[in-house]
Image (cartoon, helix red, strand yellow):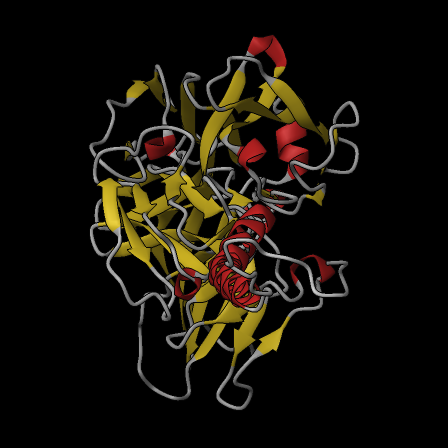
Amino acid sequence: MKALFFLVIIPFYVIFAQVGGSVTLPRKAWSSKTELYVHWYFGTDEQPLILRTPHIPLKKGSQKYWQDRLSFSSDLSLFISPVLDNDFGLFRCQQHEYLTIKETKYQLYRVIVPTMVSLLVGDALSLTCEVEPNPVHPSVKWLRPRGSNYFTKSSKNKHTINVSSISNNHSGDWICTVEHKNQMFNATTSVKIIDLSPSPPDPIYTAVNSSPPSMPCSLSSDISWPVLNGSGLQGGSWSFTPLNSSSLRPLLTLNLSSPAWRDSNGEKGFLQEKVLKERDLAVKSSQVSVKNRGTYTCSLQFKGGRTLSRKVQLEVLEVRSSNSSTSEGSTVNLTCTLGQPLPPGLEVNWIPPKTASRLFLKIHPDSLSLPSVTVQDSGEWKCELRKKKTVLTSAVMALTIEKAPVDAWLFVAVGGAAFIFVLVPVLILIIIHRRRQNVKKRQRKARFCCCKNPQAKGFYKT
């Protein structure tokens, strides 16, 4: 004699799912007894996909198609992940208690949205959420990543939004919400906006002979190079416009086959070559000198003449000296300059060597005058560029002050004066001495007879 089973059929439930996503078919609890048997079936198959018995907590069917994608939740609801194309259809849940079987049916309907959308900033966006025809006619609307929602235009089972010009605010996950009674399903699509991150609000400040700075440039969102190439990318470049000039000089070009920045036209010494990874397009300067002052432009070119570009301003601080090496007593002028007048809000702070013990004259906000310098003024004179209390960069000038050299003609003049000063008294003494000797000689001469008829001594005839 065969056992008699009583089958209780409950009307089916409508469930929505998206290919690649996951879905839970909620079991409607019938009995809390541990002797309950739960079997899940697909379509009219008699072999269960997955089952639970009082003695076997979990047992899966032998169908390879469903392997590793089915599991039970804590309340024995059926969980499917990921959902594949052929999963849409009728599912049955049978709950056995003694001689009674309760069967619940679930109809799984497909919701179709674009897998991913990548567009250039400023392009038009159109997203359609298509719901497989079903008997319940759910409420469908689009939710944008941030901000207010757009009007959803519906036509039969297709629900579309249109954005005339997209910006970075439209980048992210867009959600198509399908709602029926107390059930809600969200189908998600990702919108990638191809754009460059904003340029730095302020220039990059550095100083002569400082560490080479990095020139920032990056994509505003995580977009792979295959997606970029598929969006019509044709090339890219880094170019340079010197300070107080309008000429544009190409420095680096983009290699598309193996993403990298390479030297353009043999221009070396400004920017370093670089292999590109992910969204980072930044490069580094090779060295820092006053020749690097100017505007650097990062750009990407796309089909249709579309170009995305960002500019980076590089300011190089330098200390100039009228005499970097001079002698004591000279006047030295120091100037701290960017090659152009200081922008509003910036100021210069001078730091003298520790050995400089005297005050110096500030003749201009960025200039110093050092009159009558001494050896103590030798050393590094540091100039700090500040914005309020923040030091942006600093430059140094090494000043060498030497002892004043002795003039040879001055030495001759001084020596000659000393010689004359000694010679004159000597000459005077010699003259006086000679005059005295002449006087004595005169006094020693013979005396002559003064008779009336003088005669010479001797014998005379009478």
Please, which residue is most extreme toward the top here? 304
The one of 332 and 311 positioned closer to us in this rendering: 332
In the image, is residue 311 above or below residue 336? above
Whether residue 11 is visible here, answered yes or no, is: no
Q: Position of residue 254 (x, y in %)?
A: 70, 30
In the image, is residue 236 above or below residue 93? above
Q: Seen in the image, is 183 located left or right of residue 170?
A: left
Tell me the quadrant of the picture where the N terminus can be found: bottom right
Please, which residue is most extreme toward the front here? 462
Q: Residue at x 62, y 31 (%)?
A: 228
Q: Position of residue 98 (x, y in %)?
A: 42, 82
Q: How many marks?
A: 0
Q: Residue at x 36, y 22 (%)?
A: 160
Q: Residue at x 67, y 27 (%)?
A: 251
Q: Quadrant of residue 70?
A: bottom right
The one of 147 and 326 positioned closer to us in this rendering: 326
Whether residue 107 is visible here, answered yes or no, is: yes
Q: Residue at x 44, y 55 (%)?
A: 328
The one of 440 and 85 positioned closer to us in this rendering: 440
